[in-house]
Amino acid sequence: MQAKVLNSDDLENFMQERGIDGKIHILDVPTPTVELAAKAVNVDPDAIVKSILFLVDSVPVLVIACGTMTIDRSAVARMYGVGKKRVKLAPPDVVLSHTGYEVGAMPPFGHIQPIPTIMDPTILEQETVYAGGGAENALLRMEAHAIAEATGAQLVSVQRQSQAPDSDQT
């Protein structure tokens, strides 16, 4: 069965139905990466928020972090009481089937099913941030604290420390 593909209109409807403040900007260029997104809206890459889907023992967990941050899978593993090797990056087809959005367009909320969410607290150091807007050429602009409220995310530091390299990545 083909997964339903959601878009920026679906995200807009989700936000309106729930009274979530934010604005979706449809751009002339695709923004699938942090660097391209920052350039497209002329902001520092730290103002770009990425939403990454992980599988913890095959259960989806969304991690929201600053775009320039490297996510430490060990932090996610500790949160769920498992070893790091049991935390895997979800492949694109799994991202689509659990969220309804394609990789590079996924917003932090508005998915086809509720997903447990972790948000790195450094996002709250920014007043306004940009996140995936539901399409490769769309970005969602909103206040950082509003993302935490809209997602019900647990605030957990997930930033990898540079002195502790992830030795099992190959």
Image (cartoon, grey):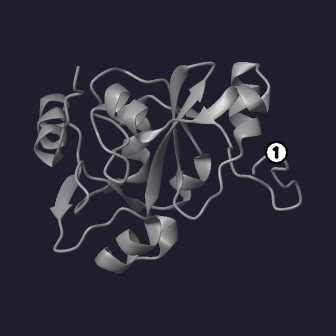
Give the residue at x 37% y 79%. 39
Picture coordinates of residue 96 (x, y %)? 33, 34
**Viewer-side residue, 141 vs 125:** 141
Picture coordinates of residue 123 (x, y %)? 53, 54
Q: Is residue 43 above or below residue 133?
A: below
Answer left or right for 70 relative to 46.
Answer: right
Picture coordinates of residue 45 (x, y %)? 49, 71
Give the residue at x 20% y 36%. 5
**Element class at badge 1:** loop
**Viewer-side residue, 62 vs 123:** 62
Rendered image quadrant of residue 82: top right
Give the residue at x 23% y 46%. 21
Q: Residue furthest right?
A: 163
Count the marks. Answer: 1
Residue type (three-letter) at the residue carrying disc 1: Asp
Give the residue at x 22% y 73%. 29
**Viewer-side residue, 49 vs 88:** 88
Q: Is residue 81 above or below residue 18?
A: above
Q: Is residue 75 above or below residue 36?
A: above
Q: Is residue 134 above or below residue 32?
A: above
Answer left or right for 140 relative to 125.
Answer: left
Which quadrant, please, contains the N terminus?
Answer: top left
Picture coordinates of residue 129 (x, y %)? 39, 60
Q: Which residue is mark 1?
A: 168
